[in-house]
Structures are given as structure tokens and as C-alpha cells.
């Protein structure tokens, strides 16, 4: 009782904001949000690592002492190493185009950039099968020249590029539009050519946004399942990427290896999250 | 060093921003481009700098007798001071001023020591000695203005173009900077064209004033000529408005 009486005058003095909620509704809303996050995101993450280490550190390491697993990891790294630089270039070009020029169909191009976000990844894979597969549009011609795209690395890279194209462009376009181009114009009147203008003026202005886009693009290209699943053909030691390999392991009841490899992807997600937070604060500061 | 502009027109869609403009700025001259907003003065300035291109046709632009009509902005190297300065925010004051020298082709680029010397000298001339290592965000409006001017002058431009040079400054700083700019110009002698919508500014600073209205030059003359013999109703009206 005494405590309640003590607190009341303070509460009475505290300025009440019009938007402030009652204690009960605050507890309920925050509780619901935290509970949901815990249930949906934190708990699964904990379980992944718990399952991965169920047979201890040695069991965990054994999972990587396997040819097919190592091949899958190498393949995924290879795909990311090709996809991320290309999409960085494409994204920069697209953002430059959209933010610097006025032209017909600009709005259409802008929504095209977002296409990967609203098209199911399975469809992204299917279109390449329909184009380059054995029964596809260019299938016979490709076969004649001995070029294999579907069920091979090129198909995996193509569909990954499709799915991850959006990130760099989507982050840079609004940023570049907001910054305007006065500094670029100043650089030009000072005698800088296009290349010098880009490296010395534009890039320093957008570097954090660009890095953020590259990080997201990388995370997605390593984790993509749906589109890759359609074009890869799941050939072990050949076209299985890390996400596909995890599914194979899981379906073969090899739970510890499956979760051990999965924990690598989870770790990638955590690192991405940390880098994203860092670059976001840098972007705000800039 | 002079600017010659012949028959320059510019249309945006169906809007005639500039109609057959002819103008000369002589060596060592300081000319004001005066007019209400939307009269095409900034457009003309940007066309001279090569940031925008005039309608194709008979129009031409010459810097000191050399035709630059079809040259790009970076080939023309007109000194340009932007309305909001457009300083490079990620570079220090010294780096900003040195930019134009550092992007020169290797064959003509001065070596590092000479660039440093040039920057120090310019900082002295704009009365910002010791500010070289600061960033633009640490400067006041008037200081930024002077850095922008030093940056434009560092490459020894053939012409100097200023877009509303005092537009964003408060009245007191404006007055001081005006005097300073006039002195500065007397020393450098570069053909200078500046845009303003402020009659007082134009009359106090310029050798000649060009009155622009709806893309048309209404009258060109010394401040005295304009005041005593306004050529048409618009000029008389426009100048009177502010004199009251």
C-alpha cells in the first residue's frame, strides 16, 4: 500500500502525452510482439544450433567431413561469387538510369526491378527451364552446340541472378534520387570525366547503401532454394547447392549433418543482420 | 577571356525557356543576369557551362573566340558556382579546392606540391587560412560560398558563372560578400556572369546588367543606363517595384 501511495503523486506529475497508452495495453502489445518474435524467429534459430550440436562438436564437424557437403558449399560460394558482382553492376546501372534520367516507361522499368519480389522463385526457375531446357525454346539449338544450361552451373547462376537482381537497385535508386546530382555536375564543370565523377563523387556518396545492397544480395544468393531447385536437378556432387543439400540430408534422416549445414546458413543470416545494422547506422550518419 | 553567345534558344517540351538570346561578356567584365524567377536565367547559365544543351540550330557559344557549342561540360571547364554550393561533403575544404587539379590528365596535372601550394594560396585569398582540413558541414553559409568559388577558380577557368551566389545567405553576410566578390573579381579579371533576382545586388556589383523576362533579353546596359532609360514597360516596372 505504502508503495502505491508513494508512486501516485509522481505519476500525477508526469506529463501525459496524448499518444501514450495505458500500462496494460503497452504490456500486452509489447508482450505480443516479443512473444511472436521469440516463437517465430529466435526459437527456430536456437533449435537449429541445438540439433546441429546434438552429438557434440565432433558430430558437428563430422558433417563437413563429407565430399557431397563440401561440394555443395563450394558450389554455393561459386554461384555467389558470380552472382553478387554481376548484380552489383546491374543494380548500379539500373539505379543510375532510374534516378538520373527522365524517359518514357520509367515507371514500368521501376516495377520491373521489383519483379523478383512478387514473382514466386519457382516461376523464376521455370522460365529458364522453358527457355533453355531440353524441350525448351532454345533447347535443341543449345544441345547442338553442346551447351548445357539447365541442370548445370549456368542455369543455377541465371536463376539466382534473377531472384537477387532487385536488392542493389532497389536500395540505391531512391537514395540516389534523393541526393540529386548537383555534386556530379560540379565535378563535371571542374573537368572530371564520367569515370572520375563516378569514383570520386558518386561512389563515396552511395557506398554504405551499396554495401547494404551487396550484403542482402549475397545472403539471398547463398540461401535461394526455390528457383535453384527447379533448374538444378538435384545432382549430388554436381548441382546441389547448400540449401538443396540440406533438404537431401534431411530427407535421408541425417538430422545432425542436415542441421549442421543449416547452421552455416543461419550463421550467414546472423552475420548479415549484424552487417546490415552497422551499414544502416552509417547510412544515417552520412 | 570572354563569352560570346549567339542565337541561343531552349525549349522544354512546348515551353520556350530561352528565345534567341545574344549576349557578350568581355574580358574582365562582371555582368549580372537579372530577372524574375522562371525568366530563364539559370537555364542560360547552365547552357553556357555545358550542363544543358541549347536547341540545335544556328546558336553558338564561344569562350574567348573558341567555339565550344558542342563540347561537353568537362571539356568546357567553365568555373561554375552552384546556388547551394554543391561542395563535395565527403572531402575536406582543401580536397574540394584541389579536386579540379587532381582530375586533370597526368600530362598536364601539376605535381602534388604545386597543388598543395595552389590550395594554400586560394585559401589565403578567400580568407579561410587554416580551414583546409575542415569538412563542408563545419562551415557557415558564407564560408561554403567562398570555398565553392575557390574550387571553381583553382583550375583557372576561362569564364566564371555564378548561380544566385548570395541567394542562401542572410542580409549581413550578403553585403560583406558582395563587396568582397567585387574586389576579388577586380584581381582575377575573369569574364564573370552571375544570376540574381535582386536588383540591388545587380546594380551594386555589375559593370553591366542584362534584364531577362520569359526567355527574352529586355535590355542590356550599365546600372545607370537601366535606371535612367528603361527600354520598355517591363524593365521600368521590374526595377521600380524594388526601388520603392
Image (cartoon, coloured by chain):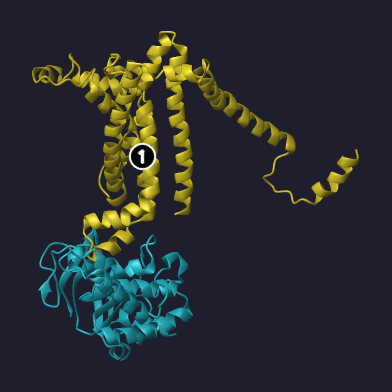
Chain colours: A yellow, B cyan
Left/right of residue A233 with respect to residue A280 in the rendered view: left
Name the image quarter holding residue A166.
top left
Residue A23 image position (x, y, % from top left): 74, 37
For the residue pair B195 and B165, the one nearer the viewer reads as: B165
Q: From the image, which quarter does the C terminus of chain B lie in?
A: bottom left
Residue at the (36%, 22%) spot, across then down: A242
Residue at the (26%, 37%) spot, across then down: A86
Residue A32 image position (x, y, % from top left): 64, 29
Name the residue at the front extreme: A58
Residue at the (45%, 40%) spot, across then down: A275
Label 1 neighbourhood size at 10 Å, few (<14), some (14-19), many (20+)?
many
In the image, residue A27 above or below residue B208: above
In the image, residue B218 above or below residue A223: below
For the residue pair A254 and B171, the one nearer the viewer reads as: A254
Work out whether residue B230 can be spotted.
no
Name the residue at the right extreme: A2
Q: Chain of mark 1?
A: A
Question: What kind of element bears circle 1?
Answer: helix
Residue A176 image position (x, y, % from top left): 35, 50
Residue at the (24%, 72%) spot, across then down: B155
In the image, residue B197 above or below residue A128: below
For the residue pair B94 and B70, the one nearer the viewer reads as: B94
Which residue has dot 1 on it? A214
Work out whether residue A221 can be spotted.
yes
Amino acid at each position: 500500500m505504502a508503495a502505491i501511495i508513494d508512486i501516485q503523486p509522481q505519476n500525477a506529475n508526469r506529463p501525459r502525452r496524448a499518444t501514450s497508452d495505458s500500462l496494460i495495453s503497452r504490456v500486452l502489445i509489447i508482450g505480443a510482439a516479443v512473444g511472436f518474435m521469440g516463437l517465430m524467429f529466435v526459437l527456430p534459430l536456437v533449435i537449429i544450433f541445438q540439433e546441429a550440436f546434438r552429438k557434440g562438436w565432433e558430430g558437428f564437424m563430422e558433417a563437413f567431413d563429407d565430399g557431397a557437403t563440401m561440394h555443395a558449399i563450394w558450389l554455393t560460394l561459386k554461384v555467389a561469387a558470380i552472382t553478387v558482382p554481376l548484380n552489383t553492376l546491374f543494380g548500379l546501372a539500373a539505379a543510375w538510369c532510374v534516378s538520373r534520367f527522365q524517359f518514357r516507361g520509367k515507371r514500368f522499368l521501376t516495377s520491373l526491378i521489383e519483379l523478383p519480389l512478387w514473382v514466386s522463385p519457382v516461376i523464376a526457375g521455370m522460365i529458364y527451364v522453358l527457355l533453355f531446357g531440353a524441350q525448351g525454346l532454345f533447347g535443341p539449338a543449345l544441345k547442338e552446340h553442346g551447351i548445357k544450361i539447365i541442370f548445370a552451373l549456368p542455369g543455377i547462376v541465371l536463376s539466382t541472378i534473377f531472384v537477387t537482381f532487385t536488392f542493389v537497385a532497389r536500395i540505391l535508386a531512391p537514395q540516389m534520387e534523393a541526393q540529386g546530382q548537383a555534386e556530379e555536375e560540379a565535378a563535371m564543370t571542374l573537368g572530371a570525366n564520367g569515370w572520375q565523377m563516378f569514383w570520386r563523387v558518386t561512389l563515396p556518396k552511395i557506398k554504405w547503401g551499396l554495401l547494404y545492397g551487396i550484403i542482402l544480395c549475397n545472403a539471398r544468393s547463398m540461401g535461394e532454394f526455390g528457383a535453384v531447385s527447379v533448374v538444378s536437378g538435384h545432382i549430388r556432387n554436381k548441382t546441389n547447392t547448400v540449401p538443396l543439400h540440406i533438404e537431401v540430408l534431411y530427407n535421408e534422416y541425417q538430422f545432425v549433418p542436415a542441421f549442421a549445414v543449416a547452421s552455416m546458413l543461419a550463421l550467414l543470416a546472423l552475420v548479415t543482420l549484424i552487417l546490415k545494422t552497422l551499414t544502416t547506422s552509417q547510412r544515417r550518419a552520412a | 577571356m570572354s563569352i560570346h553567345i549567339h542565337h541561343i534558344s531552349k525549349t522544354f517540351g512546348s515551353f520556350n525557356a530561352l528565345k534567341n538570346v545574344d549576349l557578350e561578356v568581355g574580358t574582365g567584365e562582371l555582368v549580372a543576369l537579372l530577372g524574375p524567377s522562371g525568366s530563364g536565367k539559370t537555364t542560360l547559365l547552365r547552357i553556357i557551362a555545358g550542363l544543358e544543351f541549347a536547341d540545335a540550330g544556328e546558336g553558338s557559344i564561344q569562350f574567348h573566340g573558341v567555339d565550344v557549342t558542342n563540347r561537353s561540360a568537362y571539356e568546357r571547364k567553365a568555373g561554375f558556382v552552384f546556388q547551394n554550393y554543391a561542395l563535395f561533403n565527403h572531402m575536406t575544404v582543401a580536397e574540394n579546392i584541389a579536386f579540379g587539379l587532381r582530375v586533370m590528365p597526368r600530362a598536364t596535372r601539376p605535381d602534388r606540391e604545386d597543388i598543395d601550394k595552389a590550395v594554400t594560396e586560394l585559401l589565403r585569398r578567400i580568407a579561410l587560412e587554416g580551414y583546409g582540413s575542415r569538412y563542408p558541414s563545419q562551415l557557415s553559409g558564407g564560408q561554403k560560398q567562398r570555398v565553392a568559388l575557390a574550387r571553381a577558380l583553382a583550375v583557372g577557368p576561362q569564364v566564371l558563372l555564378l548561380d544566385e551566389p548570395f541567394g542562401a545567405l542572410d542580409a549581413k553576410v550578403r553585403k560583406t560578400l558582395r563587396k568582397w566578390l567585387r574586389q576579388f573579381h577586380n584581381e582575377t579579371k575573369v569574364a564573370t556572369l552571375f544570376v540574381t533576382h535582386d536588383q540591388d545586388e545587380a546594380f551594386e556589383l555589375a559593370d553591366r546588367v542584362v534584364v531577362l523576362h520569359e526567355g527574352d533579353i529586355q535590355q542590356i546596359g550599365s546600372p545607370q543606363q537601366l535606371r535612367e532609360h528603361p527600354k520598355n514597360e517591363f524593365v521600368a516596372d521590374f526595377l521600380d517595384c524594388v526601388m520603392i
